[in-house]
Image: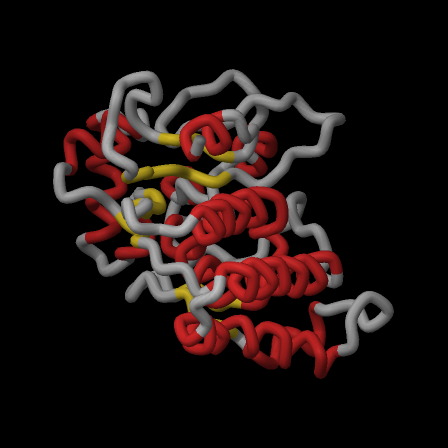
Amino acid sequence: MAMKRLASNANVRVLGNTNAERLPIFSFLIYPPVPSSLLDVPYEPGCRSPSSGDLKRKRLPLHGRFVTRLLNDLFGIQARGGCACAGPYGHTLLNIDNELSLRIRSMILKGYNGLKPGWTRLSFSYYLSKEKFRFILAAIEFIASYGHRFLPLYKFDWITVDWTFRKQAIKYQIMKEELDLTTGVDLLAENVQSKIADELEKKQGVDQKKFEGYLDNAKKIALSLPDISHQVAASVPKGVDRDLVLFHI
């Protein structure tokens, strides 16, 4: 069920062989939606596509650690973001050739660890309830639809690779006619803290109601944020070639 839902999502790319039998461990990339007026061809890091450079940037995936941050902050879901221990295999999955790899490595040696390519990974434990299982899938699908809208609310550190929530950004990014500014801050803070209360509730009916509430609150926040799929939310450091940035910023 998880593979069927994720693999069929136009904004999610499940890495590896999606037809082979495998453990419930998923490594994936999430792409921001592209307007229907543009050519809907996902850009794969390292791929020399004949499409325009502007379209390439629009179809870059969200940073793997940014996705994990949203899963945690909005839904209390823990996942891992970053590169693989088996570097050559990771290069194969992302279609990164030797030349591009060496160029990225040269910038990493200068301290720009944020340029390391990677993805998001999570697993489904056998003891998960059906409600939690569906909730995790719904959270991933939510980020595939709205995750890019949250980019201005976070600051990316090109050296430490940390995505830090900027509380003050809500005052300028959230549209007041959609959601009260103070309410927006409270909702996001509530979602970050709700995972603690969630563990105290054992009844499935209560869990389902809470999960629906988390998703509803997240959607309210997302709809109050501008759609920046056509914009750049963060600047590339001086001296760093934009072609080496393999994720959407």
Above or below — where is 119 with respect to 50?
below
**Number of marks in picture:** 0
Left or right: 18 with respect to 49?
Answer: left
* Residue at image location 56% in from the left, 61% down from the top: 205
**Residue 52 in the image, given as x and y percentages of width and height:** 58, 25
* Residue at image location 50% in from the left, 31% down from the top: 5
* Residue at image location 30% in from the left, 45% down from the top: 123
- In terms of depth relative to the viewer, which is nearer, 72 or 110? 72
Quadrant position of the N terminus in the picture: top left
Above or below — where is 218 with respect to 246?
below
Left or right: 227 with respect to 46?
Answer: right
Res. 128 in view = yes
**Residue 144 in the image, given as x and y percentages of width and height:** 55, 43
Q: How is the image coloured?
A: secondary structure
**Residue 202 in the image, given as x and y percentages of width and height:** 43, 68
**Residue 151 in the image, given as x and y percentages of width and height:** 56, 59
Above or below — where is 187 with respect to 95?
below
- In terms of depth relative to the viewer, which is nearer, 147 or 160? 147
* Residue at image location 29% in from the left, 37% down from the top: 24
- In terms of depth relative to the viewer, which is nearer, 114 or 126? 126
Q: Quadrant of residue 84?
A: top left
Res. 238 in view = no
- In terms of depth relative to the viewer, which is nearer, 36 or 179? 179
Left or right: 135 with respect to 241?
Answer: right
